[in-house]
Image (cartoon, rainbow, N blue to C red):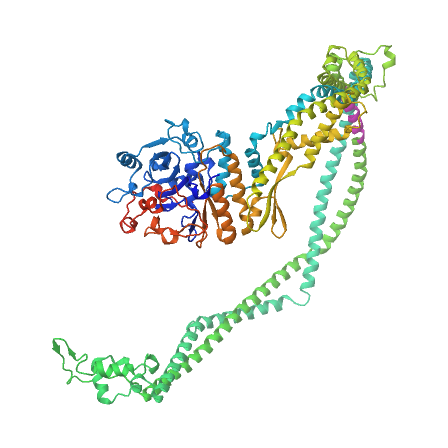
Amino acid sequence: MRSKALKTRWGVRHYAMVNSGNHIMSVFPMDGPLSICGHNNLGKTQALQSMQFLFFTHLAHMHFGAHQANTSRAFFFPSDHSYLLMEVLTPDGVFIVGAHGKGPTAGNEYELFVAKGELDMGDFVDPINRIRPYKELFRHWYEQGIEVRNLTREQMRQMLYGESGRVKGGDWDVTMVPLANANERRYQVFRQIYRNLLTQPLLKSREIKELILNVFSEKLSNANLNFLEVRERAFQRFRLAEREVERLGYRREDILALGKEYDEYTELSQEGGWLVRELRVNLTLAVERTPLCIEQLNALHKGEIEKRAKLNEQLNSRMQERDRTVEQRITLAGRLTRLDELRERNAMTCREAVEKSIRTLTAQHATLSDQLRQADIYDVATVSSRLRHTEHEIRKLNKRLEQIRNGDGLLDTQGFVDAEKAELSRLLRSDMFSLEATALTEIRPGSFNHWVRTQLMSKEGLLNLQGFELDLTDLPPMDFHSDDPAQLQQSIAMYQEDLAKLQGQLEVAQNQALKRTELDSLAKQLSNQQGYLQELTELEVLEATETADRQVLEGVMMCLAQIDEWLQGHQERIEGATRAINVIEQKLNDALEQARQLKDVQQHRQIQNSPFIPADGPAEAFERDLTGYNFGDTLNRLEWISNALDRIALTMKNYQHSIVGDLPDLARHESLSDLVQHARERLETLPQMREMLKRYHQEGIAQLSGALRDLSENYVTLEHEISLFNRRINARKVSNLRGFRLDLKRNEPILDAINTLSSHIAQADENETDLFGQQGGGASQTELVRAMDRLSRLVEDGRDGTLELGDLFDIGFTVEEVNGKVIVCNTLDELASNGSTMTLKPLLYFSLIRHLTDRGARVEPFLPFYLDEIASVDPSNQRTILAFSENLGFTPVFASVDPTTTVRYCINISECINTDNRVYVTQADWQHFDHPEDDKPVQAPQQSERDEKYEVDVGQFGDSLQVETTKADTVAQP
């Protein structure tokens, strides 16, 4: 075994991103552990996530967190001068494995290529500091002697995973993952594991189980079987016999019901034949008798109608006489009632008094009207308005008089002398200084006085204007219109005299309003007196005819009583005639209805074309009393029987169809009686058929249990492989952990079901006896059926019937710490919940990948992997991760906000941001950490020699590097 000091570090040495994502031109060392630190959302994760475009063939195989694959592709390849590059060291030399964008016009697609030569970042920049498009870059490499080969995605898969001999000339070996049996399936298993190392997504328990089965698939001969198909073949004879028994048992009630319906059909047919004969006999009798009866009833009905018409004519004559008498009574009674009312209302007055009162009221009304015509000048509203105006003027003058006496005017409060007042009168309006002092508002006390004295009354003020001078010395001063107190008192006295006059006018106007009210009252009284005079005149007329009216009213009342007595007796005679007519009409209607029924019966299909066979016997036996016989009821019953027979016939047909459909061998019996007879015979053999069904079921279980042996044996094989795998993992010591184990948690119900079926066939083979004998002490029939039903429910629950090896177990993880504490988890992410157990996640993935690789390969190239939030892992566990990463051939890339010092290189992204907020990482940004325990590879080129071509002059390219920006360059960062 080679010493570590002599071990060459094959694999990825550098990784570069050019105009990709947030990176304008960044180079990352991959020949040792690397820590990428800095604030979030700067581009730490992009360095490892973007490697998926080189290692995986399709976008569907890649994972970019919450972002879509197409969006991420446009983000990493915005133009045709965007590159992702790996410099790899293989036994055949140094190669550049890369991908370049094709630009927005090509839908931001990308192409893969391999170049033989070392990565020099200066090749990507032309002499005028612009990033070269890929066509120009390939021409530049060609001029330098660097050969470039464009590869399809499938060719890149073959190149990287051990099938380089099948690519192009087959002379370049750029194998990064020497898979054992490097086929598509093996690549898919590796891809699933390595994508987790690059992107760190959460894996569900179902995905971990599928991953384990894929890794160990070469050791498993058959990981699944279609349980439903196997069960169908095993129970084919049982299903046929079972269907026969089920159909016969299911149709048992139909067979019995068919016989019952047939008996009812025969009975109703006989009743229908009897009713048909009865209808025909009585119909003949009724046709002979009904016309004569109708003729007699019509004659009788006509006589009664004429009799009632005469009675109604007499009734109408007397009713008209009564109406005239009632009208006369009402008129006379109204005259007498009006007479009584007028006597009562006018008992306290006489015509002379009323006429005298009318004359007096007429004179008063004329006098008062003449007075009001002269009172228009004393309108109350006009006088009131003038009165309020006068009072307002008096209050206003009194207030002004009080201001003058108190001396609070604007002119008085400013303290001007007479000379100053005379001067101001030449410049300002006189009414300005006659205002009240309260009209002036000053921000600073005295500001108005200061303005007047300095601006208006100085020679530099208004008196001295530019270009001319105006001398106002000889101009006489104006009067400020100061009010004289004596004058104000005289004005107040005048307004008070006007006020007294207006008050007198208001009193006159108000009295005239009362007069108008009095005039209206006189008019009403005059109208009432005139009404009284009319009533007295009417009373005199009614009193003159009172005696005659009372005598006529008594005669009218006697006549009305005689008419009412005659009407009462005559009404009884009319009602008797009406009752006789109704009786005759009812008989006539019955006769007509019977005649109509006879016509309907004669036309009815049950008489003209009856399906029933008429009953035999003498006609006398079928005769009925025609007065109480209802042909309609008999026809309805006959119709009901006919419908019932049709329904029963349809029901029997349905029963027959159902029985023949489930028991087709009975279809040969054309007669219904033969069908019922043979169906009953089949029912008698049902117990023997059920016994045979049990025998077929046992045979099916035996065949099914044999098919499950291979699946059970594969589970045992998987348990053995997992045991060996756990040994290899525990052979590597992990700090703070005593052991780690991948557990297969048995699905006990399913395994017990398989074992129950398998033990049954094994016991049957050992005893060499009848499968259904009671020898050997094997599983009972109930246990066998329960086991098979459990497996059936598993594969029928939303699945295609396949029973897989993964259905026999679940995945679990057991961790034993140094202190002896045992932690059992169901998912890896539970193990990664703290720093010490987080190391197990990459350890498991590393071990699975190395299990997939070819142990006979020339070299094991180092592969980068990604660990985020490394700050949650203590330095001791970080060194443990570094140790088994180095041992298993993996290069860790730690990501965190703060730098990690346990690694060889560290890059602070926050310090590599240019003015365009793009990341620009050069070799000068690599911080080196020397650790005495590190092993230095001796066959690799010296560090200074290998990295000098990654020296980038930030002054030359950092802010002046030009990139042809397209619309795709602005895609948001995933």
Determine which quarter of the picture holds residue 143.
top left
Residue range in magenta is 579-594
Closer to the camera in the image, 129 or 263: 129
925 in magenta: no
User: Is residue 708 visible from the viewing direction of this image?
Assistant: no
Q: On the rendered structure, is 929 left or right of 661?
A: left
Q: Is residue 64 above or below residue 347?
A: above
- Residue 584 belongs to the span the image colors magenta: yes
Is 136 drawn above or below residue 893 in the view shown?
A: above
Residue 102 in view, yes or no: yes
* Left or right: where 743 falls relative to 414: right
Q: Quadrant of residue 680?
A: top right
Quadrant of the image for the C terminus? Answer: top left
Q: Position of residue 930 (x, y in %)?
A: 41, 52
Q: What residue is drawn where x is 69% and y is 58%? A: 339
Predominant SS along the magenta part: helix
Position of residue 656 in the picture relative to residue 873 (left or right): right
Instruction: Count how many numbered circles sit on residues in the image.
Output: 0
Residue visible at 56% across and 42% down in the picture: 729
Q: Position of residue 383 (x, y in %)?
A: 42, 75
Task: Give 970 or 339, whichever is nearer the viewer.
Answer: 970
Residue 161 image point, x, y percent = 45, 33
In the depicted structure, whether residue 305 falls above or below residue 259: below
Q: Nearer the viewer, residue 581 or 181?
A: 181
Q: Is residue 283 left or right of residue 837?
A: right
Q: Which residue corresponds to the image point at 67% horizontal and 23% vertical from the top-left?
A: 232
Rendering coords of residue 126 (x, y %): 26, 42
